[in-house]
Structure formats: structure tokens, C-alpha cells
Image (tube, rainbow, N blue to C red):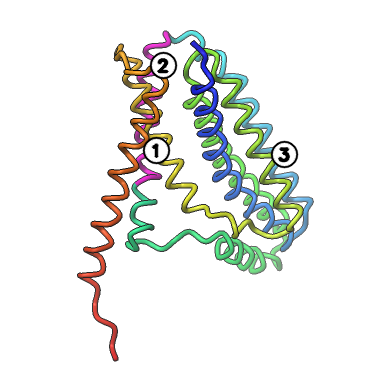
């Protein structure tokens, strides 16, 4: 049964997850365009989108041949692993164990690398390859997020719409400001997305094994809240441990 809650949660998860991935891809594309030229950037991006389209065209219809319970269980399991990977990194970043991800630094690093290759006769090819790889890899993750969040019958169009809005939003903002989206709180987004994807994964696995969730789709809110509480406690404990075991600053 399609409800407003399921539509809202599906679109939100697809939007936030896709937004993060598109920001990362856009940073590389922008670095290629600014450093080398926009021609290899657009060619690499276009080829990657074409490959993604073919992959979706080939493998998309196969999903309809799989029983929904098996599909939900398998996708739910993968979604838990995928979401917990993001959540683990977000917790470690928030607690200070690993550095925060900085799109501006990523842009600068990619730009420096491309400048070093500028004297190479294959500069355009290398620049286009960088854009191709960035769009293809991040695009595959977007496709996975859309399929995973839209696993329930009738939800795939809403998940796709959420991802499409994210792509358009990043492109519009990026081209308007003409710089990496360093002002976007990406680490906060990754924390939220990690929570949402893990919550969806737990929900789909339960659906796959026939769990009768209390409140149906509303149980997603409870799962999300439980994971959020656990994650914030983990951040607080790890931050305290990190501070207590850090070397004192020399006076």
C-alpha cells in the first residue's frame, strides 16, 4: 500500500543519498573543466551517463522477475551494509578519529593533479577519463540508492524522482556559484543518509522475512530514531575516549 509516509521517506532518502554522490562527481567534473577544458569534461560525463543508461536498461527489467520478498531481503541486506559503511565513517568523523571530508580540498587536489598532467599530450584523454570514472562510480551508487529505496512495489518512480531532483539541484547550484559545493554540510548529510539507508535496510529485511512492523511504514521513524540515538551515544563515547587518549599539547 502506497502512503504519504512511504512516498516522503523514499523520496527523502533517495534525494539525500543522491545529492551527496552528485556533489562528489560534480567536484571532479568542475576541476576537469576549469583546469583542462570543458570539452573532455562533458565527453567523459556523457560517456559515463550512456554506460549507466545501458546498465539500467539491461539489468532493470530483471528485477521484475525476482519475487518481491527475496528482492526486499537481498536489497535490505546490501542496504544495511552500504548504510552502515557511511554511518561508521560519519561517526568516526564526528568523533574526531578521521578528518572531515572537504570538497574544496578535494577540488584543489584534483586540480593540482590535472595541472601536472597538462603538459602531457594525452592531457585531454586523462582529464576526460577522470570525469568518466567520477560520474560512472558515483552514478552506480546513485542507481543502487534509487533501487534500494524504491524496493517496495510502486516506490521506484518516487525514488527516481528524488534522485533526479538532487541531480538538478546540484547542477544548478554548482553552475550558478561556479565552484565546488564546499558550503554544503556534506558530512552532516552523510550522517543522515547513513542513518536513513540503514533504517531502510532493516525495514526491507524485516519485510522480506515476513515481519509485521507495528504502524507499517511509520515504523521507519522508530528504526531511524533508534539508530540515531545509538549513533549519537557512540559519537559522544568515542569523542571522550579520543580526547582522553590524545597526547597533551606542548606548552
Q: Relative to 37, is 193 above or below?
A: above
Q: Secondary structure at mark 3?
A: helix
Q: Relative to 57, is 28 above or below?
A: below
Q: Quadrant of residue 168?
A: top right
Residue 160 location in percent, x, y? 60, 27
User: Which residue is rendered at x = 47% and y = 20% of the image?
Assistant: 151
Mark 1 or 2 closer to N-term? 2
* Circle 3 residue: 46
Q: Please identify, in this view, whether the residue under mark 3 or under mark 2 is nearer the observer.
A: 2
- Crowdedness near tag 3: few (<14), some (14–19) or many (≥20) residues, C-alpha within 10 Å: some
Q: Please identify, in this view, whether the residue under mark 1 or under mark 2 is nearer the observer.
A: 1
* Circle 1 residue: 83
- Crowdedness near tag 1: few (<14), some (14–19) or many (≥20) residues, C-alpha within 10 Å: many
- Crowdedness near tag 2: few (<14), some (14–19) or many (≥20) residues, C-alpha within 10 Å: many
- Is 71 within the magenta? yes
Residue 71 bears which disc, if any?
2
Q: Secondary structure at mark 2?
A: helix
Q: Nearer the viewer, residue 28 or 43?
A: 28
Amino acid at each position: 500500500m502506497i502512503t504519504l509516509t512511504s512516498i516522503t521517506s523514499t523520496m527523502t532518502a533517495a534525494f539525500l543519498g543522491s545529492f551527496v554522490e552528485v556533489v562528489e562527481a560534480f567536484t571532479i567534473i568542475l576541476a576537469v573543466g576549469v583546469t583542462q577544458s570543458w570539452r573532455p569534461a562533458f565527453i567523459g560525463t556523457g560517456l559515463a551517463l550512456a554506460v549507466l543508461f545501458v546498465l539500467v536498461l539491461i539489468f532493470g527489467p530483471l528485477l521484475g522477475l525476482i519475487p518481491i520478498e527475496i528482492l526486499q531481503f537481498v536489497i535490505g541486506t546490501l542496504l544495511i551494509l552500504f548504510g552502515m559503511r557511511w554511518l561508521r565513517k560519519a561517526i568516526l568523523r564526528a568523533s574526531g578519529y578521521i578528518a572531515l571530508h572537504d570538497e574544496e580540498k578535494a577540488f584543489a587536489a584534483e586540480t593540482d593533479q590535472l595541472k601536472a598532467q597538462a603538459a602531457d599530450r594525452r592531457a585531454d584523454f586523462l582529464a576526460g577519463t577522470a570525469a568518466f570514472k567520477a560520474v560512472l562510480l558515483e552514478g552506480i551508487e546513485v542507481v543502487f540508492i534509487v533501487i534500494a529505496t524504491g524496493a517496495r512495489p510502486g516506490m521506484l518512480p518516487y525514488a527516481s524522482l528524488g534522485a533526479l531532483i538532487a541531480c538538478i539541484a546540484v547542477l544548478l547550484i554548482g553552475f550558478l556559484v561556479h565552484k565546488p559545493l564546499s558550503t554544503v554540510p556534506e558530512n552532516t548529510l552523510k550522517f543522515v543518509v547513513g542513518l536513513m539507508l540503514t533504517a531502510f535496510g532493516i525495514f526491507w529485511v524485516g519485510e522480506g522475512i515476513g515481519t509485521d512492523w507495528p504502524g507499517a511504514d511509520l515504523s521507519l521513524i522508530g528504526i531511524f530514531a533508534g539508530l540515531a540515538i545509538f549513533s549519537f551515544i557512540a559519537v559522544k563515547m568515542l569523542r571522550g575516549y579520543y580526547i582522553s587518549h590524545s597526547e597533551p599539547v606542548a606548552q
